[in-house]
Amino acid sequence: AGLVAIVGRPNVGKSTLLNQLVGQKVSITSKKPQTTRHRIIGIDTKENYQTVYVDTPGLHSEEKRAINRLMNKAAASSILDVELVIFVVDGSKWTDDDQMVLNRLIAAQKPVILAVNKVDQFKDKEELLPHLQWLGTQLSFKEIIPVSAQKGTNVDRLRALVQRSLPPCEFFFP
Ligand code: GDP
């Protein structure tokens, strides 16, 4: 199964997007990671592939406070073995927290798909594009895709991109 991390600062729409991608959320009974490094947040099983979405604790801090070195280390190691990252941003807003996540992704050197969320809020493409062009130069994104997690816009395309970016599935979890 392909291991994919969904990252982004709070409120960009990660949970909403995950729900769209997976259909229904895997119920997490424990707050503890299922593996030493990851917390599985969703599994998308289709006919011939399976994608496991995981959380990368510390990579996108849920709190404003400065992240200590230990947490940075944990974040760094939790992202080590994912095959792909979906970096979710709010198309209308770029904050210091987005920048922090971006910096970590640059350091992690993983393939990243940039999902520009909440595009339903834009009447005009021009509003979105200037900002996107700058962002596009910051990291060698595999793809940049505008989505609306709320409306489901482009979610199928995103899923297809994810699928295409992952190695073929050799076995399925039961
Ligand atoms: P998370 O903290 O990154 O997991 O973000 P959530 O999924 O909890 O979403 C944060 C807020 O943004 C919620 O109020 C969502 O309803 C809203 N939201 C998420 N996706 C979209 C979208 O595509 N368009 C709009 N307009 N709002 C969205």
Image (tube, grey):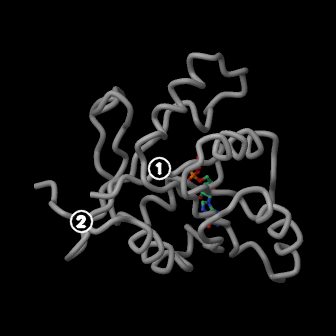
Answer with left or right where residue 2 lies relative to residue 55: left
Circle 1 residue: 5
Element marked by disc 2: loop
Q: Return the residue at label 2.
A: 169
What crowding class fits label 1: few (fewer than 14 Cα within 10 Å), some (14-19), or many (20 or more)?
A: many
Q: Ligand 1 appears in which quadrant?
A: bottom right
- Quadrant occupied by the N terminus: bottom left
Q: CA distance from mark 2 to mark 1?
A: 17 Å
Q: Residue at x 28, y 33 (%)?
A: 34
- Residue 136 image point, x, y percent: 76, 65
**Amino acid carrying mark 1 in the image:** Ala
Given residues 76 and 24, the one toward you in this image is: 76
In the image as oriented, which residue stretches furthest toward the left? 174
Residue 164: quarter of image: bottom left
- Closer to the eye: label 2 or 1: 2
For image coordinates 65% across by 53% down, the residue present is 12
Type of the residue with mark 2: Cys
Q: Number of labelled discs?
A: 2
- Residue 137 in picture, x, y percent from top left: 80, 63
Quadrant location of the C terminus in the rendered image? bottom left
The quarter of the displayed image where residue 97 is located:
top right
Residue at figure coordinates x 63%, y 73% from the top left: 145
> Does residue 123 sit above or below 3 in this rendering?
below
Q: Nearer the viewer, residue 170 or 91?
A: 170
User: Which numbered disc flags the more N-terminal residue, 2 or 1?
Assistant: 1
Asked if residue 33 is positioned above or below residue 131 in the image, the reply reads above
Q: Write down the quadrant of residue 169 in the picture.
A: bottom left
Badge 1 marks a residue whose secondary structure is strand
Label 2 neighbour load within 10 Å: few <14, some 14-19, many 20+: few
